Image (cartoon, helix red, strand yellow):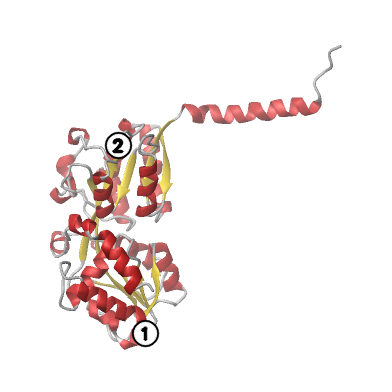
């Protein structure tokens, strides 16, 4: 004898039907997976994500995190990649290339290549990445807490900054550059890093309150008044200004290191066409302009004109870019393990 289905069975059927109705359109949607940092995502969504998805009818799936974590994920998925395009700082992009994780860029598929500054076309020198932003590495400090202006990297060692300085960890994008600039400030250079390590060990004993791993952490430290001064990457300057704190940016007398972040394509990318669409969108005049005006990224597209008010907060203009110090990132990559070991033993004890 057959029995009628229970009310619970009917309810379950309706729930499953509703789920399928919701999911079916999603399952058919084109998707491109992008690995990036996740800093300032509200503005990135406004200027990049939403405009891309509308223009290409393709959803961007983001994998967010720092350089080190994301390169590890890509390495673990080397035989079955799930990322299409990846954004890295220079040394991490070189490391990924050396480990066979990146495709060679087909520059014939890069639209408006002639609009890019020459230094952005192949900043890695291996054809495996296109620059999408340039930024410098300087010092930010609280003008209400520090009366004597900071003008030099050496000023971070001053007694009036005791216990009020934060340094980036060695594993961050700017970590090795901190060693280099400390060396340069006190008579050494990247080929003679002993000076930098010795001085940074001294600084960690007197003035350093903590080491930061992400720019978002540093912003919180400034807001909580635990930190009065810190070396900072220029792309974080816009967010720091938005805190409303009395902060100022300094290009130290010894110079500022320059970085060109790259977009690369992961070897075996599931959606190769989508990866090129994403690169072209990110490099387009409209997106580069929107990112610059919102102080997210300094433009590499030479057709972008930035008003003076925004330009003052960006790495922009031939004079400023011409004064940047570009380090040998192949060299820094070769000494990476040694420097991390020394940092952990001598500085971040």
Quadrant assignment, res 296: bottom left
Q: Which residue is mark 2?
A: 267
Crowdedness of circle 2 by 10 Å Cα count: few (<14), some, many (20+)? many
Query: Which image quarter is the C terminus in?
Result: bottom left
Front residue of this view, candidates 267 and 263: 267
Identify the residue at horizontal 37%, vertical 45% (top origin).
35
Query: Helix or strand or loop: what does disc 1 sit on?
Result: loop
- Across and down, in percent, residue 157 comes to 29, 82
Of discs 2 and 1, which sits in the foreground?
A: 2
Q: CA distance from mark 2 to mark 1?
A: 47 Å
Identify the disc placed on residue 162. 1
- Across and down, in percent, residue 198 comes to 25, 77
Query: Helix or strand or loop: what does disc 2 sit on?
Result: loop
Residue 248 seen in render: no
Identify the disc placed on residue 238. none
Q: Relative to residue 53, is residue 107 drawn left or right?
A: left
Identify the residue at horizontal 29%, vertical 79% (top origin).
156
Mark 2 vs 1: CB contact within 8 A:
no
Query: Which image quarter is the N terminus in?
Result: top right
Question: In the image, is residue 189 above or below residue 321?
Answer: below
Question: In the image, is residue 94 above or below residue 31?
Answer: below
- Across and down, in percent, residue 207 comes to 35, 81
Residue at the top extreme? 1
Residue 245 seen in render: yes
Quadrant assignment, res 97: top left
Identify the residue at horizontal 33%, vertical 61% (top origin).
172
Question: How many labels sit on residues?
Answer: 2
Residue at the right extreme? 1
């Amino acid at each position: 004898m057959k029995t009628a289905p229970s009310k619970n069975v009917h309810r379950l059927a309706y729930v499953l039907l509703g789920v399928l109705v919701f999911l079916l359109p999603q399952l058919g949607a084109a998707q491109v997976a992008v690995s990036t940092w996740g800093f300032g995502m509200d503005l990135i969504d406004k200027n990049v994500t939403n405009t891309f998805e509308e223009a290409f009818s393709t959803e961007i799936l983001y994998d967010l995190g720092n350089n080190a974590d994301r390169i590890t994920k890509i390495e673990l998925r080397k035989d079955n990649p799930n990322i299409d395009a990846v954004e890295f700082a220079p040394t991490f992009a070189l490391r990924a290339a050396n480990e066979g994780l990146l495709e060679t860029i087909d520059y014939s598929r890069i639209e408006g290549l002639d609009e890019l500054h020459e230094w952005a076309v192949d900043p890695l020198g291996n054809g495996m990445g296109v620059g999408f932003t340039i930024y410098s590495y300087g010092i930010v400090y609280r003008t209400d807490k520090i009366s004597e202006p900071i003008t030099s990297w050496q000023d971070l060692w001053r007694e009036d900054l005791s216990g009020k300085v934060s340094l980036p960890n060695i594993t961050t994008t700017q970590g090795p550059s901190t060693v280099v600039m400390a060396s340069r400030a006190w008579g050494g250079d990247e080929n003679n890093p002993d000076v930098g390590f010795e001085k940074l060990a001294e600084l960690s004993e007197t003035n350093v309150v903590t080491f930061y791993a992400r720019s978002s952490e540093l912003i919180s430290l400034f807001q909580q008044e635990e930190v009065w001064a810190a070396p900072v990457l220029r792309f974080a300057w816009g967010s720091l200004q938005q805190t409303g704190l009395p902060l100022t940016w300094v290009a130290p007398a010894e110079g500022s290191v320059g970085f060109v972040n790259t977009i690369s394509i992961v070897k075996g990318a599931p959606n190769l066409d989508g990866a090129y669409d994403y690169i072209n969108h990110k490099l387009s005049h409209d997106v580069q302009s929107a990112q610059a005006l919102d102080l997210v990224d300094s433009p590499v597209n030479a057709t972008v004109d930035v008003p003076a008010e925004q330009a003052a907060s960006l790495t922009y203009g031939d004079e400023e870019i011409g004064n940047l110090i570009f380090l040998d990132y192949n060299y820094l990559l070769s000494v990476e393990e040694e420097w991390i070991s020394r940092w952990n033993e001598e500085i971040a004890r």
